Each structure stands twice: as structure tokens, then as C-alpha cells.
Image (tube, rainbow, N blue to C red):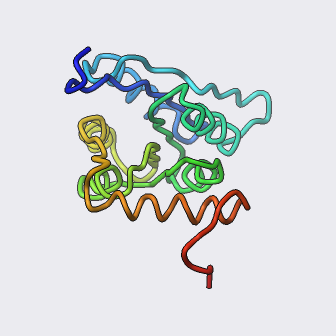
């Protein structure tokens, strides 16, 4: 592959019982998208007593370790999944239910994890958002790169693995 070509995404998809139906629909769409090399199921076993934090953490770890490029997580609102995924160092997760937020989450914030709420967006809007999400790539030479680096520096400082330029308020 030429260095100017964009490598297809390796996407992990996860949900809880409140997002399972939409997640399956979106995973099927992703599996037919030429921009996506692979779709991995993060797994969800309601019989085990597992809930959205377990699924979100498992998917986020796959992104953080480089086993996946991105994760798509679906629960009732998308909020709990995003909160949990953001607890994994190196992961930037967002809940976004409109095209502009999806675009900016990638182009301005280099978010690798998109969280959606099945109880918040209908299937056709969700499909549009995911198609749009797979089409955006963060430009490390963009003006936003310094801000993303600052986010990472604050994260390292909070973990005690680096320094931050500002003291948290």
C-alpha cells in the first residue's frame, strides 16, 4: 500500500442490551463498507451479569493497545459507554448524535471511539453518522494537533507518567 493511501479501519463494535439492536445493524453496515478492513464484536453476555462498563472497557482496551483503530459503542444514551471508554488511557471517546459533532470529534479531537444511544437516535441517522465517522481522519499536521497533544499531556500528568503545562483547577 502506498503511504498516501489510507489504510482501512479495524473497528470493534460493542453494546449492552439497550443498544444491541442498533449495534448489530451498524456492525453489518460497517462489514460492507470498503473503508473498513474488519469488524470485531466486543462481546456482550447479559446472562453473565455483565453491563455496558465491561463492554466499553474491553473495546477501549483494543483501541488503546492498537488491536483496533476505532470502536463504535451503543447503549441507551451513549453516555455511560463514553464515560467508561475514557477511563482507558490513550482513548478519546465521544457521544455524538449529530453530523457536525461527529465530524469535529475526529477532525478536532482525534476521537477514536464513537458512542451512540439507541434511545436517542433512530437507525437511519445512526447509519448516516457512522458512514460519516468512517470517512473522517485526524490530520496530525492540523492546528488541532497541539490541542490533542495537550489532552494527552494532561492525561499522562493525571496518571503520574508525565507532566502537564497547567495545574488542574
On screen, 48 above or below 152? Answer: above
Residue 104 falls in image quadrant: bottom left
Q: Nearer the viewer, residue 133 or 167?
A: 167
Residue 46 in the figure: left or right of residue 64 = right
Instruction: Identify the residue at the far right of this view.
Output: 48
On screen, 10 above or below 167? Answer: above
Residue plotted at (63% across, 66% down): 163
Residue 18: % across, % down: 56, 42
Residue 154: % across, % down: 58, 66
* Quarter that holds the C terminus: bottom right
On screen, 139 above or below 26? Answer: below
Residue 31 in the figure: left or right of residue 66 = left
Residue plotted at (25% across, 26% down): 6
* Quarter that holds the N terminus: top left
Q: Nearer the viewer, residue 123 or 91?
A: 91
Residue 159 falls in image quadrant: bottom right
Residue plotted at (25% across, 55% down): 142
Residue 96: % across, % down: 38, 55
Amino acid at each position: 500500500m502506498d503511504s498516501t493511501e489510507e489504510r482501512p479501519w479495524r473497528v470493534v463494535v460493542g453494546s449492552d442490551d439497550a443498544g444491541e439492536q442498533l449495534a448489530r445493524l451498524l456492525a453489518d453496515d460497517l462489514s460492507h463498507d470498503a473503508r473498513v478492513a474488519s469488524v470485531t464484536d466486543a462481546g456482550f453476555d447479559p446472562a453473565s451479569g455483565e453491563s455496558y462498563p465491561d463492554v466499553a472497557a474491553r473495546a477501549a482496551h483494543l483501541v488503546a493497545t492498537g488491536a483496533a483503530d476505532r470502536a463504535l459503542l451503543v447503549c441507551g444514551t451513549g453516555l455511560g459507554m463514553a464515560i467508561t471508554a475514557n477511563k482507558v488511557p490513550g482513548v478519546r471517546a465521544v457521544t455524538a448524535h449529530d453530523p457536525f459533532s461527529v465530524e469535529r470529534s475526529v477532525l478536532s479531537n482525534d476521537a477514536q471511539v464513537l458512542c451512540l444511544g439507541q434511545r436517542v437516535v433512530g437507525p437511519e441517522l445512526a447509519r448516516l453518522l457512522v458512514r460519516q465517522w468512517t470517512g473522517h481522519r485526524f490530520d496530525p499536521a492540523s492546528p488541532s494537533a497541539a490541542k490533542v497533544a495537550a489532552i494527552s499531556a494532561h492525561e499522562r500528568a493525571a496518571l503520574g507518567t508525565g507532566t502537564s503545562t497547567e495545574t488542574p483547577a
